[in-house]
Amino acid sequence: MRRLRYLLAGMVALPFAVLAWLWLTMLSPFTYDRPDHLPDVDGGPHEVFVYGTLRFAPVRWVVMGRAGETRSAILEDFRRDGLDIAEAPEEQVEGKVVVVSDRELERLDRYERLGIRYGRMNRRLADGSEAWVYQRLADEPETVEPR
């Protein structure tokens, strides 16, 4: 009987723990301060190429407040490298492009820890369109390339 109580308590506590983690990661003022050297986000819409967790609608919904419409896209001359991409001639990364507002782009910046963990670069995709692409930062805090 005691094990059943622990199991039920865990089943109740787990969703609250997940929600607390999501709030702390995505919305709280305690886990990310946009670095002062970053330029302000211009008004949207913005096209963003996503190649990792943000390819999944539930993740985008949690991060941006909606899943958003996407289209398949390819980033040429790059390859996946764990949670990052790296330049690699004649290789390609498959992903999706999502169109976001300026507020949603700010939320994506927060999720990617722009200026701390990732930079946001403007890249040309295989179809000729341009989109923002998050790329892991080296030790230097370079963050946003101008368009």
Image (cartoon, rainbow, N blue to C red):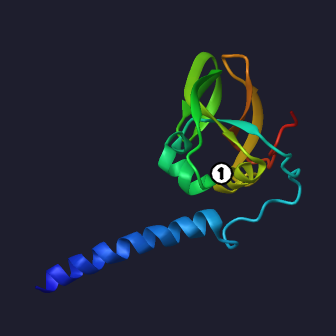
Q: Residue furthest bottom?
A: 2
Residue 70 lies left or right of residue 4; in this view the side is right
The percent coordinates of residue 41 (x first, y second) are: 83, 49
Q: Residue furthest top?
A: 90
Q: Residue furthest left?
A: 1
Nearer-the-camera pick, 16 or 85:
16
Q: Residue at x 64, y 30 (%)?
A: 86
Nearer-the-camera pick, 17 or 139:
17
- Quadrant of res 120: top right
Q: Residue at x 74, y 46 (%)?
A: 101
Query: Quarter holding the C terminus?
Result: top right
Nearer-the-camera pick, 77 or 74:
74
- Quadrant of res 33: bottom right
The percent coordinates of residue 115 (x first, y second) are: 77, 52
Q: Residue at x 79, y 60 (%)?
A: 34
* Vertical arrangement, residue 147 with respect to residue 40, above or below: above
Label 1: which secondary element: helix
* Vertical arrangement, residue 94 with respect to residue 59, above or below: above
Query: Which residue in the structure is indicated by mark 1?
Result: 112
Count of all numbered marks drawn on residues in the image: 1
| Badge 1 amino acid | Glu
- Quadrant of res 17: bottom left
Query: Quarter holding the N terminus?
Result: bottom left
Q: Residue at x 80, y 46 (%)?
A: 143
The percent coordinates of residue 87 (x first, y second) are: 67, 25
Binning the other alpha carbons within 10 Å of mark 1 as few (below 14), some (14 to 19) or many (20 upward) gives many
* Vertical arrangement, residue 24 with respect to residue 40, above or below: below
The percent coordinates of residue 24 (x first, y second) are: 59, 70
